[in-house]
Image (spheres, helix red, strand yellow):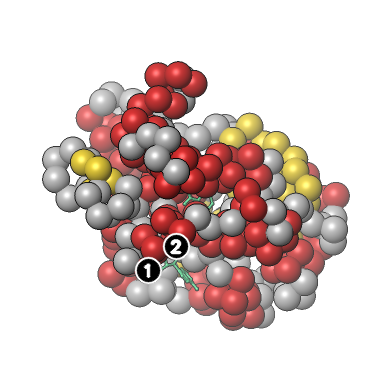
Amino acid sequence: MADIKKVGVLGAGLMGHGIAQVTATAGYDVVLREVDDATLEKGIGRIEKQLARAVEKGKSSQEDADAIRGRIHGTTDYADLADCDLVIEAITESLERKLEMWRAVDPIVKPEAIFATNTSSLAVIDQAAATTRPDRFIGLHYFNPAQVMKLTEVVRAVTTSDEAFQTGIDFATAQGKLATPTRDTAGFIVNRLLVPYMLDAIRAYEEGVGSVSEIDEAMKAGAGHPMGPLALSDFVGLDTLGSICDVLWDEFRERRFAQPPTLRKMLSAGWYGRKNGMGFYDYSGDAPVVNPGV
Ligand SMILES: NC(=O)c1ccc[n+]([C@@H]2O[C@H](COP(=O)([O-])OP(=O)(O)OC[C@H]3O[C@@H](n4cnc5c(N)ncnc54)[C@H](O)[C@@H]3O)[C@@H](O)[C@H]2O)c1
């Protein structure tokens, strides 16, 4: 299997900063690339905050936290990815943006390196085929928050070699994840099942089955879920949820994957959920309250 020592992570948003942190925690050197300094600093700031919290809670020593932070090198320059053994992209869920990014990254990174996408819904082959290494291209699908969630879906595109696929399985396992193989089918395992559930919760709300908080509290108390489906939609990011269901809809043309009107309107209003403070809930105060505008 390919020997992985240095890992590039593209995007330091919700997922990218977490992937960078778990990767550095597992002992790998990480190059974390963002589009500008301010966004990069925000992502690294989140990592530092979580490392500090782990020390405060006695879950990590200061020495270990410093070592993890020391293994993460932030950059806005693609050239710093040149000698990475594995490059994982966690940028905005847009095929166009991802292809534009790979076109810039592919000629820079050493040819034997493996590329991976953390896409939630796009076909891995569509990105793989745009690079010069479709045999060394896999999906590594982490879950939010990547530092906490146990699962990584390891996706095999039709072009992926056995070696690259096994490297993905070994890498996710070395990070302490349950590495679950899945085929390159839109939504893979978890989102194929979870996204229609979140969309159905929005439809149930539209149909007056329950209020936002009644739906969320019912699923917590009645189904034992740690979070209700509308709070979960905010947590995933309504923009990301919207993009995922568009891709699933394009692929399957089934109503269960279509954006409910409420979601479409919330996206037009610029309400992206927790990440920008407004979604089904308003996060601007001490505790979330239901958004009266929904
Ligand atoms: N949100 C989730 O729960 C979740 C879970 C699993 C996978 N994903 C997937 O992870 C990816 C990122 O999602 P997110 O929720 O972290 O989004 P996000 O909006 O929080 O972060 C995306 C980041 O990518 C950066 N970016 C854009 N172009 C870039 C480039 N060329 N180079 C470097 N950085 C770039 C943006 O500045 C932004 O900070 C998407 O493909 C999404 O489908 C999301």
Q: Is residue 169 above or below residue 116?
A: above
The answer to which image quadrant residue 12 occupies is bottom left
Write down the residue under mark 2. 264
Secondary structure under the numbered disc 2 in the rendered image: helix
Q: What type is the residue that disc 2 sits on?
A: Arg
Residue 24, how many percent across, how many down? 47, 46
Q: Is residue 195 above or below residue 266?
A: above
Can you tell which mark lies on residue 77? none
Residue 236, how many percent across, how many down? 44, 48
Write down the residue under mark 1. 268
Q: Residue shown at 53%/57% (left/top)?
A: 259
Q: How many numbered circles are shown? A: 2
Mark 1: few/some/many CA within 10 Å (<14, 14-19, 20+): few
Position of 294 with respect to 99 (left or right) is left
Mark 2: few/some/many CA within 10 Å (<14, 14-19, 20+): few
Task: Point out the residue furthest to the left here.
Answer: 286
Residue 221 visible in the picture? yes
Q: Residue shown at 55%/75% (left/top)?
A: 97
283 or 40: nearer the viewer? 283
Q: Is mark 2 within 8 Å of ligand 1?
A: no
Q: Residue shown at 50%/35% (left/top)?
A: 149
CA–CA distance between discs 1 and 2?
Answer: 6 Å
Residue 192, how many percent across, how many down? 66, 45
Residue 31 visible in the picture? no
28 or 200: nearer the viewer? 200
Asked if the residue at tag 2 contacts the one at tag 1, i.e. Cβ–Cβ closer than 8 Å, the answer is yes
Q: What type is the residue that disc 1 sits on?
A: Ser
Residue 258, how many percent across, how many down? 59, 56
Q: Residue shown at 76%/64% (left/top)?
A: 125
